[in-house]
Image: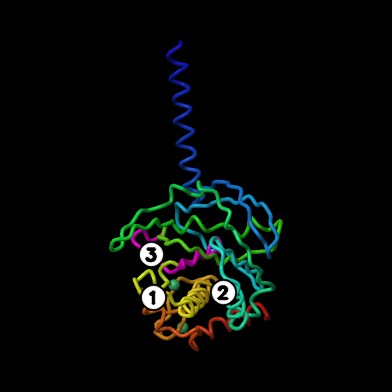
Amino acid sequence: MKASVALQTKLIFQLNRFYNYLHRKVNGFSQKTRTFAVRVQGIPHRVKIKIISFLGTPRPVFRTFPRHLAIVAFSPLPNHFQHAIAVTISRFLNELFYSIRYVEATDVPATFHAKNVRERKRGTRDFRLRGTNTFYGFGRQMEEITPADIVLAYTEEPIFSNTYKKAEFLFGEANRILDSSIISLAPLREEFYGRTQNNRLLLERVLKESLHELGHQILYSIDHCLDPSCVMNFSREVGDVDRKRLAFCPDCLEKIGLLHARFNL
Ligand SMILES: [Zn+2]
Ligand SMILES: [Zn+2]
């Protein structure tokens, strides 16, 4: 009966693997836990973060407003960038948020989702791109230290989409299920295209992309506006970002107005 015990163990192991596979398929995501050092409004904390990857189709969830917004910087943002982002969001979407907090999550271990990377060449330069799922699922884990139920995250690194596999060097992506979005500064920089550094232009682009991704999150839609001057218009190239205004068109403003009406803001 020795052989049958070994066989049984093997079978149980395989069944377990299959069970786990099904469990992940049914629940639509897998989770890993990592501990991070973060700074909330300049004060250091440690926080456990569940890194969530989607495997299935996301399900819609009902959302309410106002909410607490966290600006999560995976690469530190200059002070005037932090300020300009908060001012821009307040200017256009003030009533939708109780608070806007700045959280720095720069002390990220090297193993941070190490597998979710791609190596790509652009011209003569080598780039390491991170998958967008790496940056989601942050907000809910910070509840103990700071209220944050919607996250706008920033990284200096180039990114690729884990949802639309062919999309690389994205400016940003929103994940409405996890109430998070990520903005990548790399392709918003003039240097990325071999041109002279221009910080004023970079800030303008960062602000437009911030409003764009937050727009997807609050309107709970990945639809893009057809008005080429509207901030919710899709940008394929950096020139498209420059063509847009830092403002919502009347149609998009109306949609935001409906949110105000629904939540009595
Ligand atoms: Zn978009
Ligand atoms: Zn619009």
Residue 151 spot, x, y in % from top left: 58, 65
User: Which span is picked out in magenta?
Assistant: 163-185
Q: Label 1 to label 2, Cα distance in Å?
A: 19 Å
**Residue at far top of view:** 1
Q: Residue at x 42, y 72 (%)?
A: 189
- Who's the residue at 47% across and 54% down the image? 54
Q: Quadrant of residue 90?
A: bottom right
- The question of residue 168 being in magenta is answered with yes
**What residue does disc 3 label?**
169
Amino acid residing under circle 3: Phe
Q: Nearer the viewer, mark 1 or mark 3?
A: 1
Callout 1 touching callout 3 (CB < 8 Å): no
Q: Are marks 1 and 2 in contact (CB under 8 Å)?
A: no
Closest to the camera, between mark 3 and mark 2, is 2
- For the residue marked with disc 1, what is the amino acid? Thr
Q: Which residue is mark 1?
A: 196
Measure the alpha-carbon separation of dots 1 and 3.
19 Å
Per the picture, the main secondary structure of the magenta-coloured stretch is loop
Q: Nearer the viewer, residue 217 or 197?
A: 197
Tell me the residue at 38%/61% (across/down).
164
Q: How many marks?
A: 3
* 48 sits to left or right of 248: right
Which residue is rendered at x = 66% and y = 77% of the image? 263
Neighbor class of circle 2 (other Cα within 10 Å; few <14, some 14-19, many 20+) is some
Percent across and percent down for residue 6 are 45, 18
What number is the disc on residue 81? 2
